[in-house]
Image (spheres, coloured by chain):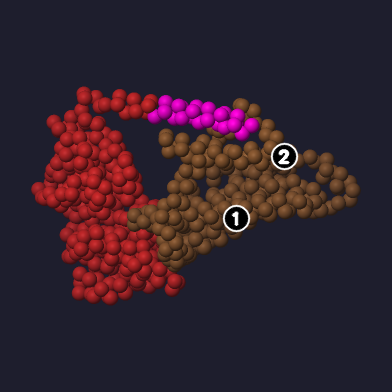
Chain colours: A brown, B red
Amino acid sequence: MTAALSDSKGAAPEGGRVLRTNPRSTLTRGAGLGLGVIVLWFSVLVLLPLAAVVAVAVNGGWEGFLTTLTNPQTAAAIELTVLTSLAVAVLNVAMGTLIAWVLVRERFRGSRLLEVIIDVPFALPTIVAGLVLLALYGPSSPIGVNVANTRTAVFLAFAFVTLPFVVRSVQPVLEQLDREAEQAAHSLGASAGVTFRRIVLPALIPAIAAGAALSFARGVSEYGSLVLLSGNLALRTEVTSVRMLTYVENGNLAAASVVATVLLFVALVVLVAIDLLQRWLVRRG
Amino acid sequence: MALKARAGWLAGVAVVVSMGLAACSSSADDATNSGGPGGGAELSIVAYSVAQAPNQAVQAAFAKTSDGEGVTWVESYGASGDQSRAVESGLKADYVHFSLGSDVTRLVDAGLVAEDWDQGANGGTVTRSVVVFAVRPGNPKNIQTWDDLVKDGVEIITPNPGSSGSARWNILAAWGAVTANGGSEDDAKAYTTELFNHIVSLPGSGREATSAFLAGTGDVLLSYENEAIAARQSGAELDYVVPDTTLQIDNPGTVTKDADPAAKAFLDFVLTPEAQAIYAGFGYRPVVDGVTLPEVEGANDPANPFPTPGTLLTIEDFGGWGEAKKKFFDEDTGIITQIQVETGKSS
């Protein structure tokens, strides 16, 4: 508890900065209390563990980073994980938006069912998901598709577990969207394509970006759903979570933390990039 | 403004802290109140997952002895390495049962288990098995020997020796099959490289490997005799072959330094022929003499469940786990680690 307390004091400038950047702060006593609870909660749940990971990683110094990251197996795993997560995020932007559109704008038999099924990848324990994927797309596939132990398997598993993110972030925005603007555009002679691109899409971009960011972050950390299907083959289908487990099994927490820190950094860069892209698109849109 | 906000902030901290303390103290009460019926000792057992069903059967038999009467159990099962690390970082354990010796060594280093834990007659081993080949029903590819594993078109699946400590038994067995039969270290390296070229999947744990195999991956699963027997007992469709040269798997069990005396009584009971016969029923080979073997359902020959291999290696042939771990599985310089990287590159 003392650790938590001292950290929350350390985190105080965070709260202070928020106030400074907004000189006419609207914080009342109640809101201040709320902010305090949030900062503490955030510190205990997120900041402290992250700081601990980075601290362990930095302990080994540059050399620790270098040895870990030049390990061919680790480097290949990081590359595979990050690139596949990015590719899946891009796929989700397209497919997720499409699914959200269909769910909100179209009424058809089974649309309610589809609505419920979208969330299944969230609810299913990932190892069960892995078994299901292996049964369907593995060597005894009933439909003759066998991607087991290939990089496609990694992509497939990521796509499976991240499916709901873009759908669920876009859907409510789309539901709230004022359709009169679209009708106006249409009556002024804009084609459906132009209406979507100029009227609908700009409103959706922040939601799409948020979904893509979540999807990327989830992919980077995935383990359970792909561990059966991908085969964890060194340099080929091994992802970072398996690498980290290997380091932990060998008692090398420092190296595991180095990989985690690098992933954190990559995730941060990607999240910031997505945010900047989103702002730029909205301003331009 | 900032001051005011900070005051509210601290109030918030106080609220959450007191709530947290309340939660802590109530859980402590729960722990003290949950003593067993009849005032027997409460023992914490921390073990690796495969051992759960057999251990529970042995615990039930222990409860019928005078030492075990009234003893209640707090059980924790999971991957061997994870369980060992959990105990190292504070999980309460009176009795531990792991897949491989280095998981106990970790606790010795942490000062939680006595240095001489493996000095008894059984060398610290409480359950025993051997490395076997699990194959498709009827053994369609006719796999009998280690050489058969690297024939054209044979696909192998084994748990990942990197992330699963217990998977390391399988790879060492392959290595030892060469060196025990007159091969040099280079021959062993060449063979193991060839073996990795035939490996199509390296799931995270033994359980996951079995799941992936049963879902259709590979022709051969490198596994343990007891796991193959247990899988067949639960209706899994697989056969298994005990190779002529194989490695003896010694699963260590011991009590912790601060354990309740009842834990020692349990360890003694585990090493009786009676308890070993129970383990045998689940497919483990006895570690003491004088065990009357039951019919082992799921074994190739239930009446003679544990055939003696031509050459049976032990971890001592590799210099013990400390040395083997460094030589073969070091994450940078280990021979197996390097083979994994090389075979990954070439395909």
Vertical relation: B171 (above or below) A277: below
Which residue occupies 73% across, 38% down?
Answer: A176
Of badges 1 and 2, nearer the viewer stands: 1
For marks 1 and 2, the one nearer the N-term is 2
Name the image quarter holding the C terminus of chain B. Answer: bottom left
Name the amino acid type tagged 2.
Glu
Which residue occupies 36% across, 56% down?
Answer: A252
Vertical relation: B149 (above or below) B80: below
Left or right position of B250 against B88 = left
Name the amino acid type tagged 1.
Val
Say whether residue B2 is magenta: yes
SS category of the residue bearing label 1: helix
Labels 1 and 2 in the same subunit = yes
Dot label at residue A175: 2
Which residue occupies 72% across, 42% down?
Answer: A174
Dot label at residue B254: none
Residue B58 location (% of width, % of height) = 21, 39
Left or right position of A220 against B173 = right
| Stretch in magenta | B1-24
- Badge count: 2
Residue under label 1: A270
SS category of the residue bearing label 2: helix
Vertical relation: B108 (above or below) A255: above
- Label the magenta part by its dominant secondary structure: helix
Residue A128 location (% of width, % of height) = 46, 47
Which residue occupies 24% across, 71% down?
Answer: B178
Q: Residues within 10 Å of mark 1 (few under 14, many from 20)?
A: some
